[in-house]
Image (cartoon, grey):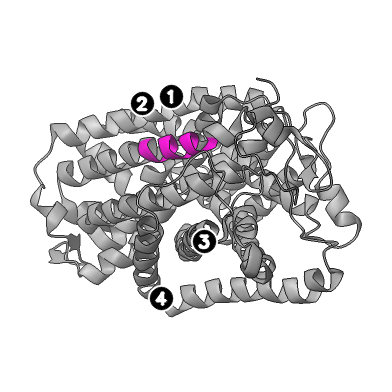
């Protein structure tokens, strides 16, 4: 790694030097900070999280979903502080695995390889599961309107999103920004309906759930905490701003801002409508036992025609979300391929960038096809729960990296330093450990197997190459285009 003694040298000089320790600038650095935020928020997709993921919690934790989302928001705040500091130091398209790798320096260096590859293995799960969850969740709503099989519709959304994601990043930023505005209007409509019919305020603090006899019964606090993992999944994506860092102008200075703003908007855009639905539902029992809870709520508080209008808005939001997530995850695959994650020529093919659009075509296509296959073969509930458990493990690794990075000096030149370090990552770890213990044995096993496969792959494939693979670098410059 190039050593820089003068921490006060000018910004261009600090990050302009390219060489064997720096990546070539292949992607188009044409995004503004707000362009990054628009794509990031579109990937979080507050509307689809409320309409497709929150119902998973509603049918399992009832009105306790409110507390699950509050706890997840608190966890999101301390995690965002960790991501902001790490990403400001290492704004690399690989995101989490690159942040982990660079955090382990000095005496901690031997742990950099295995820890970062385990993180990447978890992201391979996300790359497959998360886009499919979003697309399939939307299919359930749109299928009721257009009489189309939800699985087929979800698969079609995945493939179309992948095609559009192959275009230039700036075009996609504009497109996702327009669609994001539409989905915010859908969430505003949902909030207004809830406020107009608000009466279930007590259920927010005393969780209740409908049973098979249409009678409300109390929800155990342990169930609320267990479903916090689903709420974490619902908010997830605000840290994906770092995946577009190599395409964002001045990313060393601005990426922390993009992450923190994305989290704030995400929490407000999801927690407020979810709360409004709970307090405004004519019947909590019917809401929490309905096959499609939000369909029941909208039709019970308005009419079928209004639901159809909202469903169309959600259709656009789903496509927008799927597009943004495909964009993000394609860049993770591109970055990992650039770091020689795959054997032989496969890494070369996967890291190829189209000369005209400056987008990683093959990784984009793989994300789209994998998501389409899962839409056709796996249920929505299974996808949401599997992803939630893996996210908890990924968050824990990032919290550990935020502690290690300060002690090793990895973030000493970061343009953003979290306040009250190390309290935020310690609080995050405490919450994550407890949430993890509340997951089912099956979900824990799947997550453990995923991490085990990542470690085994590193031991068998990566380690024997002795630095020829998975020897991560830094970005060459982050001032291009300013």
Q: Nearer the viewer, mark 1 or mark 3?
A: 3
Mark 2 to mark 1: distance in Å? 7 Å
Q: Choose the circle earlier in sequence order: 3 or 2.
A: 2
Q: Choose the circle earlier in sequence order: 1 or 3.
A: 1
Q: Are marks 4 and 1 in contact (CB under 8 Å)?
A: no
List the residue tagged with mark 1. 181
Mark 4 to mark 3: distance in Å? 35 Å
Quarter of the image for residue 160 reads top right
List the residue tagged with mark 4. 440
Q: Residues within 10 Å of mark 1 (few under 14, many from 20)?
A: few
Query: Helix, strand or loop at disc 3?
Result: helix
Quarter of the image for residue 310 reads top left
Quarter of the image for residue 459 reads bottom right
> Which label was assigned to residue 185?
2
Q: Which one is nearer the viewer's eye here, 331 or 477?
A: 477
Mark 1 to mark 3: distance in Å? 42 Å
* Residue 69 drawn above or below residue 107: above
Q: Which one is nearer the viewer's eye here, 276 or 160?
A: 276
Is-magenta flag for residue 259?
yes
Span colored in magenta: 255-264
> Which label was assigned to residue 262?
none
Q: Are marks 2 and 1 in contact (CB under 8 Å)?
A: yes
Mark 3 to mark 2: distance in Å? 45 Å
Query: Helix, strand or loop at disc 2?
Result: helix
Q: Residues within 10 Å of mark 4 (few under 14, many from 20)?
A: few
Q: Which quadrant would the C terminus be assigned to in this image?
A: top right
Image coordinates for residue 49, horizontal then vertical, percent: 41, 45
Q: Choose the circle earlier in sequence order: 4 or 1.
A: 1
């Amino acid at each position: 790694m190039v050593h820089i003694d003068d921490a006060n040298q000018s910004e261009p000089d600090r990050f302009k030097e390219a060489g064997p320790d720096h990546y070539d600038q292949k992607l188009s650095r044409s995004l503004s900070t707000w362009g990054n935020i628009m794509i990031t928020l579109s990937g979080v997709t507050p509307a689809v999280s409320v309409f497709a993921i929150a119902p998973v919690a509603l049918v399992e934790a009832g009105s306790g979903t409110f507390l699950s989302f509050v706890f997840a928001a608190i966890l999101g705040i301390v995690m965002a502080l960790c991501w902001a500091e790490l990403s400001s130091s290492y704004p690399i398209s690989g995101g989490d695995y690159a942040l982990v790798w660079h955090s382990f320096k000095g005496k901690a260096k031997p742990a950099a390889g295995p820890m970062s590859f385990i993180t990447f293995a978890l992201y391979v799960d996300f790359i497959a599961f998360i886009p499919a969850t979003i697309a399939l969740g939307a299919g359930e709503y749109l299928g009721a309107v257009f009489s189309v099989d939800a699985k087929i519709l979800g698969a079609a959304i995945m493939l179309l999103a992948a095609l559009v994601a192959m275009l230039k990043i700036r075009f996609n930023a504009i497109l996702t920004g327009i669609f994001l505005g539409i989905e915010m209007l859908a969430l505003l409509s949902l909030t207004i309906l809830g406020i107009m019919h608000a009466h279930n305020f007590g259920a927010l603090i005393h969780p209740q759930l409908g049973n098979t006899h249409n009678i409300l019964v109390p929800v155990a606090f342990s169930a609320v905490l267990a479903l916090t993992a689903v709420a974490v999944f619902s908010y997830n994506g605000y840290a994906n701003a770092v995946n577009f860092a190599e395409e964002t102008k001045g990313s060393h200075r601005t990426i922390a801002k993009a992450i923190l703003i994305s989290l704030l908007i995400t929490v407000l855009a999801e927690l407020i409508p979810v709360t409004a639905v709970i307090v405004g539902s004519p019947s909590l029992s019917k809401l929490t036992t309905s096959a499609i809870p939000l369909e029941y709520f909208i039709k019970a508080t308005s009419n079928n025609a209004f639901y159809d209008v909202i469903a169309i808005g959600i259709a656009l939001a789903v496509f927008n979300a799927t597009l943004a997530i495909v964009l993000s995850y394609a860049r993770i695959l591109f970055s990992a391929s650039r770091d020689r994650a795959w054997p032989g020529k496969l890494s070369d093919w996967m890291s190829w960038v189209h000369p005209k659009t400056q987008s990683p075509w093959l990784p984009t296509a793989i994300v789209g096809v994998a998501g389409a296959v899962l839409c056709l073969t796996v249920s929505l509930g299974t996808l949401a729960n599997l992803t939630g458990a893996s996210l908890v493990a990924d968050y824990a690794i990032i919290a550990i990296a935020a502690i290690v990075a300060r002690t090793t000096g990895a973030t000493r030149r970061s343009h953003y330093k979290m306040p009250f370090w190390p309290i935020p990552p310690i609080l995050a770890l405490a919450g994550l450990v407890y949430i993890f213990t509340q997951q089912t044995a099956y979900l824990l096993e799947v997550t453990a197997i995923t991490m085990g496969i990542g470690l085994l792959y590193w031991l068998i494939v990566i380690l024997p190459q002795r630095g020829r693979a998975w020897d991560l670098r830094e970005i060459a410059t982050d001032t291009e285009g300013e």
